[in-house]
Image (spheres, coloured by chain):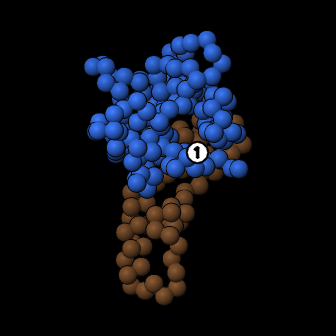
Amino acid sequence: MKYTVEFSESFAKEFTRVPQEHQDAVLDFVVIYQGHGLNDQTKYPGRVSPSWHNLPVNHPNYAYTKQQHLWHYHVGLPDYAGAQLWGKTSDWVLHFQWPDRGPTVALVDLYQHYTWDNKFYLPPKSALSEEFGD
Amino acid sequence: MVKMHFLMRLEQQGGPLKKGDGLVFSQIDKERMNKALASPRFSIPNGASKEEIRQLILGVASQSK
């Protein structure tokens, strides 16, 4: 199966604003995804999670993240926590849309998992691919 | 090369246009086209090296308004 990665102009602009180490982390994800998709997460050193995971269904972010098919990948920056071979967590995560667990993902944003006031950061709707949402 | 998927995306949004759909479809098509043009997306070619992908993304950023 062919796995496709897409990105928007806004993502490209954000990409220019991060250090090369962060860019490399994104590129590592892209290369692994194109080679293996997301069904076998042991291919990834970092954890891949749906962004509505662990949210109560009545939380406003639950509907937003699920309708927009938002997932995130722990990219290992500044470091991975844990000693296991895969599924590790990190402060920085790569947000992406993965509609219906299909063969295409759209890169959205790279950001720290939590904001300064300890809220889970979610990319705004303006950064998302509209046709990937429900 | 960067490949823009306007046509593919238009089909994903509303299904392929069919002969005989007439004026109604031409209006829908315009709406879908405007929507796609408002937020173009780019595909990363499979098999590209990490450095090639980096340059592709940086190239898109440098050409964007």
Colour given to chain B in the rendered image:
brown
Q: Where's residue A112, x and y in %?
A: 41, 23
- Three-letter code, disc 1: Val
Q: Residue at x 58, y 45 (%)?
A: A5
Which chain does the numbered disc 1 sit on?
A: A
Residue at the disc numbered 1:
A5
Q: Residues within 10 Å of mark 1 (few under 14, many from 20)?
A: many
Residue situated in front as seen by the camera: A71 or A28: A71
Whether residue B60 is visible, yes or no, is no
Quarter residue B47 falls in: top right
Q: Describe the element under mark 1 as helix, strand or loop.
A: strand
Left or right: A28, with A68 as reference point: right
Q: Residue at x 47, y 36 (%)?
A: A50
Taking A39 as reference, is A104 above or below it? Answer: below
Residue situated in front as seen by the camera: A62 or A12: A62
Residue situated in front as seen by the camera: B49 or A46: A46
Quarter residue B50 falls in: top right
Chain in blue in the render = A
Q: Residue furthest front?
A: A57
Q: Where's residue A121, x and y in %?
A: 36, 29
Q: Where's residue B37, x and y in %?
A: 42, 60
Residue situated in front as seen by the camera: A32 or A19: A32
Q: Residue at x 55, y 26 (%)?
A: A47
* Quadrant where the image shows the C terminus of chain A: bottom left
Left or right: B14, with B1 as reference point: left
Left or right: B49, with A113 as reference point: right
Taking A94 as reference, is B21 above or below it? Answer: below
Q: Where's residue A40, x and y in %?
A: 66, 35
Whether residue A125 is visible, yes or no, is yes
